[in-house]
Amino acid sequence: MRILLLVTIFLISTCGLIYELVAGTLASYLLGDSVTQFSTIIGTYLFSMGIGSYLSKFVTKNLEINFIRIELLVGLIGGLSSSILFICFGYGAYFRVILYFLVGLTGLFVGMEIPLIMRILKSQSSFKDLVSDVFTFDYIGSLLASIAFPVFLVPYLNLTRTSLLFGLMNVALALYLIHFFRHKIHKPSIAFAQGVVCALILGFAFIASDLIQRMSEEEYHGDGILFATTSKYQRIVITRDRNAYSLFLNNHLQFNSRDEYRYHEALIHPTFAHAKSIENVLIMGGGDGFAVREMLKYPEVKNITLVDLDEKMVDIFRTNPLMKKLNNNSLLSSKLKVINQDAFLFLQNRKQQKFDVIIIDFPDPSNFSIGKLYSTTFYHRLQQVMKPSTLGVVQSTSPLYAKGSFWCIDATIRETGLQTLPYHAYVPSFGEWGYVQFSILKEAPKKRKLPKDLRFYTEAEWQNMKHFQQDMLEEEPIVNRLNNQALIPLFEKEWAVLMD
Amino acid sequence: MNRRGFVKLLGTAAVGTILTRNLLACGRKNPIQVTIVGADFKRGHSVRQVQKPSYFNQTIQVKNIIVGGGISGLSTAYHLHEMGEKDFLLLEMNSEIGGNSSALKTPYSWAPRGAHYLSLPNEDNFPMIAFMQKHKLITGVEDGKYVYNERQLCHAPNERLLYRGQFQEGLVPEYGLSESSMTEIEQFFSWMRSLKIAIDSNDKQQFNVPVSSGAFEMHVENLDKLTFSAFLAENKITNEELLWFLDYCCRDDFGAGMDKVSAWAGVHYFAARKANPYNADSTSVLTWTEGNFHLSKLLAESVKDKIVKDEVVHEMIETDENVEVHSYNPIKKSWTKYIAEKAVAACPSYVSKHILKSENWPSAFFDGFTHFPWFIGIVTVKKLPDTKNGVSLAWDNVKYGTKGLGYVSNRHQELSKMEGPLVLSVYLTLDEMDAAEGRKHLFAMDETEMLKRIVDELKGIHPDIEEEILSVDIQRWGHGMITPVPGTLKKQLSYKELTAKANRVFLAHTDYAGYSIFEEGFDAGFKAANNLKSVSHERLKI
């Protein structure tokens, strides 16, 4: 019996730590800022365990059956916790309440386990041996959990299944204990039936866990969802397919880590290599930090001002370890100043400051709200922060799939008196992609030495990028103005044809 | 001045109807904050019984005096200043200028109290073009066409119509129309387009803005004599969708339907606008979050020190020597006598009738002008319920088949991504009864009743909107605007004749054009300023 109960201690401590780790990881994934999440989750959990330990003294009778009931509750609550949290994460403000409630509840019951089991075991050995054995197995269990969690469980099972699996282990242990203590329990069949119901719930959830984790987003993202959140402005979803990560904003693909270097090298280097000066840089959009990563390859860059409306988006890419790795910690650079503001408002308040280089990386013009950022009025305002020598670029959707839209952006920029140089590059995830470089004067480009570690862009490739095959040309492009927003229906129409 | 109160929608009114029960079942938890805003109509009404002061607290001598700080009065002042005249004053009854073109500041946005847009002027309207160039509403010329300030042109989507369950772009019903209906509609518009270039025997355009620059005299004997509906029936225009649209246009621009306005007014609406801008459509409009209050401010900019607010004029007495203006300031509780060489009565006809004592302007002239009442609900909503059926929120949003005018989204012209509540203006006419009766009804309605009409109008477009409403400000206009009923042009003829004989007092108001739009007020002011300057005082004496 002693061996059995020590195995029990080992298992419950493993399970307990797993629930804690799952909650911490999940909170970091969903809310960002892993330091805060882990420390508050661990704090809440340990504090709740303390309350549990305190409350355990009020359990005076029927220790065995009460221990088993607690075991079942821990299995059920802990096991389902990550599923519940994944389902609830869309509910914003209430999410944290549910999170800490579940962590607290799990901690409370786990906290009751050790005192109760010590009291069950106290007739078996001396107090000195009992304390020593219980804590030895408790700590070994924790070690095992902390190693298994990152090495095997998360990579092979994912968070939902990990917690469900350990929930099932808790319940299985309880069922075995019911059998073991059957003589000490009043009506063991009822307890057994309760245990089976718990096991069935967890088992069903385990089988359906894919559904739970993906729910509605399944149809948009074939890959596993690593992270999903809703900011004030948009739905941010990061998916993972083996070693590649993709970012979706409102279900529009923003990058795939396999080939984003092509997109971002084509966005940054033609302008950085040819601009007269690159000391002061303005980038609008691009909160993922990839464009900034490319800029930082030039030591001459002194100041980068990044204007992105969505604070949450920038936060994710500044703090999430995976994303930080992808953007090479670019958002932590001391050269970078992030301003979370609407681009129009930013330009309105900035009449004195001028930039050498301007990178515009807004989402595609798929609605009237974003369409304003592709209008003549916007490009007029932009000129207030340009010097005569400033060189800039606008990401301009696909000149192949949406050639009317691409040339509309080019014509709109030209309408405001700016010179343009349209070019394109092939990005497998997006297809043929277009950019429009702009300047006030048509000057001979400067030839700056390119950084060494580029994978796609070369000066020779630049010559090809400027050439448009005839299937990408448009005879009479229209101009996008605030009062017609001609780009929006055009863009919708062109992409709708492609989706049919 | 503002009456503020919390009104529980359908708390007391209309108990027992089916609608009430429905609303109570899914009703709001919290009452809506309702505020009655706007000019103190008691000030305006106080002049109906002319008060004779026992003594004047002060007497002021001034060369020219303008009574009324709406667009006509402001335009008079603006043009006097443009001509280099410095010796004049403008008296405004309210604490804010603009009249129909004033605005209200809500916690989230400005909202127009009345007029909210400016159509693009015709290219031969030189004073307007000059004003617009001066204030950068027109920024240049390209290919011989005017380039309008795109910041101020109404941003897309301009208007949408809820028709057959879909939000379509534009207000002329289109979705799923039969071939024959489409042909009938197109034929009507092409007929109207042909009238745009119609001229009279003197090469004068038949329809033009301002009205006085068109050959309006030729219509006195025909189009001015019948209603627009009678005219349409005569011309066998029967298409249901087209008739709804035409009636909507009349209610929107004239405050009353096509069975009330004259055929001339109906045709003028479609045949008088001829702008050919470089960077917009001819039917584009300029608009601002604060509506035409923006234009009031532009006009007032250079003459600020000439404007005296809170001056309620009780009498304007024209004598051989001068014009005496008796004015009461309800805040200072003091009377002022202004003695001017000449004056402009830039107030509505029904005010001039009471205050103007002049042999040149017989009291009978001021009768027979029709003004329908309006009220406007300025509704602050947390958000709009999701509408996935068609075009997204536009500036002007209308539902087909209703008598209402829909709503305008006041924050539409903001450039940055919209955050926080929306501010919607719901325009409601009371043209189901005659004008005077409607006016009585308007001031007899309590907050609950007005609120119900405003919310019902919104619910026609967004059934689930009630829960989203934060507050409602209600602006009432007893005399909303001049309605061009049959006989309007005849009235204009006598205005022309009387102006030619006028001595020291001129009138400037859209009432005398029969059409309450900015350009008419602007033109009235332009002409009044010229009239003040044209004949010298000396010559008049002879």
Image (cartoon, coloured by chain):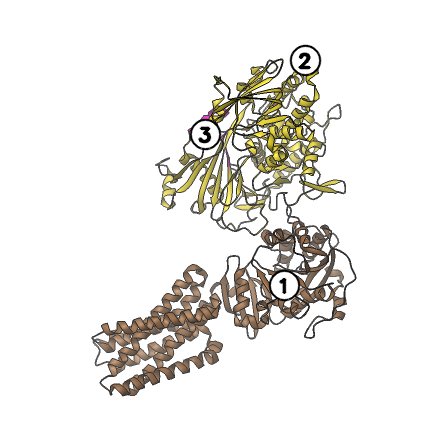
Chain colours: A brown, B yellow
Q: Is residue A60 visible?
A: yes
Task: Tell me whether circle 3 and circle 1 mark residues in contact (CB < 8 Å).
Answer: no
Location of residue B217 in the rendering, given as x and y in whole percent from the top left corner: 67, 21
Q: In the image, what residue type sits under mark 3? A: Leu
Q: Of helix, strand and loop, which one carries label 2?
A: helix
The boundaries of the magenta stretch are B427-444
Mark 3 vs mark 2, foreground winner is 2
Query: Which mark, by number, is residue A304?
Result: 1
Q: Residues within 10 Å of mark 3 (few under 14, many from 20)?
A: many
- Residue toward you, B290 or B444: B290
Say which chain tag 1 marks. Answer: A
Residue at image mark 3: B442
- Residue toward you, B364 or A35: A35
Q: In the image, what residue type sits under mark 2? A: Lys
Say which chain tag 2 marks. Answer: B
Q: Of helix, strand and loop, which one carries label 3?
A: helix
Q: Of helix, strand and loop, which one carries label 1?
A: strand
Task: Tell me whether circle 3 and circle 2 mark residues in contact (CB < 8 Å).
Answer: no
Mark 1 vs mark 2, foreground winner is 2
Q: In the picture provided, is A70 more to the left or to the right than B257?
A: left
Q: In the image, what residue type sits under mark 1? A: Ile
